[in-house]
Amino acid sequence: MTAGASMVAGTGALRDGEPGGTERSVLAARRLSVRYGDVKVLDDIDFHVAAGEAVGIVGPNGAGKTTLLSALAGTVRPAAGSISLLGTDLTQLGAERRCRLGVARAYQVPKPFGGMTVLENVLVGAAHGGQLRRRERFERAVEVVEVCGLADLANRRAETLGLLHRKRLELARALATGPSVLLLDEIGAGLTDSEADELVATILQLRQRGMSLVWIEHIVRVLVRVIDRLVAMDAGKIIADGAPDAVLRNETVMAAYLGKTRS
Ligand SMILES: Nc1ncnc2c1ncn2[C@@H]1O[C@H](COP(=O)(O)OP(=O)(O)OP(=O)(O)O)[C@@H](O)[C@H]1O
Ligand SMILES: [Mg+2]
């Protein structure tokens, strides 16, 4: 495989001291607010991911977790605040441009292209990521298909896959863009325990290659095996941020969950 086709792009190209985050941030949001109509769904959020770091996000339903990911990926436009990637201001850029620059997102509900094979779907991801030549795209797609445990299914039509493999394909399509940071939204939801374990093993492999990750997941047992840091959200705000066990024991975080289960 050529260096240009590597699926882990850009993580070494950090610029220190740039505005928009801490010195080693890959992705950073400053004072971010998002509104849906009159409702403030994200309220003055500061968020960052360091190079090679895996950050988990938890919070009750409706906390604003997916909206944060959408704002980072560029599918939702913030009412206020800024977002930067490796020191480049992304705030005014759409999702397509951000993807080319290195922000990749896997959706909670996988949306593969039906009528196309697994490999073809991943090739579309590779084509969206940047300026690879045809051969390099192919090499990257093959590598990603292997890393994501889909090698035996490369020629299967995407619509015939079961849930675990559709989730793996969703991950593969995102990875094929050669991201500097990967945004995962409940990629473990709906999986059996052993399927979730397999997915964790795959994501741990990505971590070993230095991939920076943001992972929203309700299945905390799964999340804590992968992440360095945990962010808890409630009602559009970050209510705790730190070592996973400390955040999970935080009284405000526990109260946020309790409040929702009672309501
Ligand atoms: N397109 C939209 N238009 C209007 N309101 C929306 C829209 N999308 C989300 N919301 C509202 O914004 C709030 C935050 O939603 P979001 O999907 O970000 O929460 P979440 O933390 O991801 O929740 P969940 O755990 O259920 O996925 C919720 O109150 C939701 O109803
Ligand atoms: Mg969500």
Image (cartoon, helix red, strand yellow):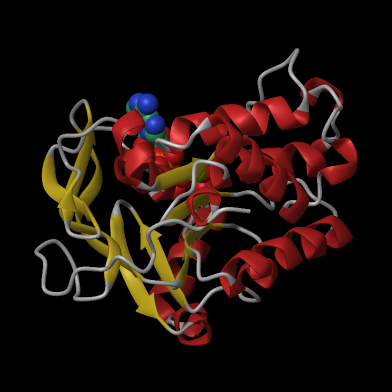
Is residue 84 visible to us here?
yes
Task: State the residue at coordinates (9%, 64%).
Answer: 19
Which residue is more in the foreground, 244 or 211? 211
Question: In screen coordinates, is 161 left or right of 1?
Answer: right
Quadrant holding ligand 1? top left
Tell me residue 228's x, y (percent): 49, 79
**Location of residue 164 with respect to 27 vertically, above or below:** above
Question: In screen coordinates, is 83 left or right of 179?
Answer: left
**Location of residue 97 with respect to 58 vertically, above or below:** above
**Location of residue 188 with respect to 93 vertically, above or below:** below
Task: State the residue at coordinates (49%, 48%).
Answer: 178
Which residue is more in the foreground, 16 or 110? 16
- Displayed quadrant of residue 16: bottom left
Tell me residue 195's x, y (percent): 84, 56
Task: State the residue at coordinates (45%, 50%).
Answer: 179
Is residue 75 visible to us here?
no
Tell me residue 193's x, y (percent): 84, 61
Question: In screen coordinates, is 202 left or right of 12?
Answer: right
Tell me residue 8's x, y (percent): 50, 58
